[in-house]
Amino acid sequence: MWSALKWTVGIILLVIAALFLHYTLPQRDVVRITNTYNRLTTVGENAIFYATPDVGTAESSTTRDIRFIEAVRPNGKVIVYRNEDTGWIWPPFFKYDSSNLQAKASDMKSTAEAPKWVAITKYGWRIAWLSIYPNAISVRPVEGPDVTFFPWLNITIIVVLVLLVLIIRRMWLQFWERMVDPAVKSVGQTLDDIDASADAARQRARTRWGRFWAWVRSLFR
């Protein structure tokens, strides 16, 4: 049962880490931009998926003026991006040029008859029923809709994180082996010595008590 519990907790933590990385790490979409605009947006329960108010254009605690970029994928499916600054906190993209990015995206708009394909670097997810949009980080023109990109940055970040986890795990095991195990063994030995002393004391007490009752009985013989 303990082994099954450890596996369950481990799998849950692994899934959470994978979702976190998938949301945070940058990805590139090849799309055709069809429209750009600003819209007052109410941010409520889904505020965790938006930039913090101090780096955005918040009108109030729940309403802010957000830039949006509408686009079409090569397969004809539409995608909508938000365009917000990220600031210096999280995610660590240090984006403060949302106005410039909006101007570039507006300049790259095109029609289906004369498409201009661009690569939009973004992070996040598009979940329509939660009003969640990926955040556009950069945009640049590409040669066509079939352009592909190898995720060197993402692979490097994942490899570094895996190495850090292995190093931390090794350090923890060494700490446990050098500090915790000897302490546990010392406590266990101390408890064993205490038990042995207590057993010896009880044995001596029983012996003395027996001698006392033997002396008492000898008085009445």
Image (spheres, grey):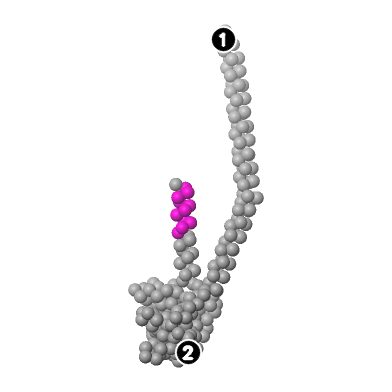
> Would you say 65 lies left or right of 174 here?
left
Q: Secondary structure at mark 2?
A: helix
Nearer to us of marks 2 and 1 is: 2
Q: Residue at x 63, y 50 (%)?
A: 177
User: Where is the C terminus found, in terms of image quarters?
Assistant: top right
Give coordinates of residue 48: x percent, y percent: 44, 72
Q: Residue at x 37, y 88 (%)?
A: 112
| Mark 2 vs mark 1, CA separation in Å | 115 Å
* Magenta region includes residue 9: yes
Other-residue count near label 1 (Cα within 10 Å), few / some / many at <14 / 14–19 / ≥20: few
Mark 2 residue type: Lys
Choose between 45 and 7: the one closer to the eye: 7
Give coordinates of residue 101: x percent, y percent: 48, 86
Mark 1 residue type: Phe
Q: Please identify the dominant SS of the magenta region.
A: helix
Task: Let me know if residue 2 appears in the view.
Answer: yes
Q: Give residue 72's mark.
A: none
Choose between 221 and 54: the one closer to the eye: 54
Q: Residue at x 41, y 77 (%)?
A: 133
Q: Give residue 220's mark.
A: 1
> Would you say 5 lies left or right of 199 here?
left
Q: Residue at x 39, y 87 (%)?
A: 34
Q: Secondary structure at mark 1?
A: loop
Q: Give residue 104's mark.
A: 2
- Which corner quadrant of the image does residue 30 belong to? bottom left
Vertical placement of 82 versus 171: above or below? below
Task: Let me know if residue 52 appears in the view.
Answer: no
Give coordinates of residue 21: x percent, y percent: 49, 69
Other-residue count near label 2 (Cα within 10 Å), few / some / many at <14 / 14–19 / ≥20: some
Residue numbers of the magenta segment: 2-12
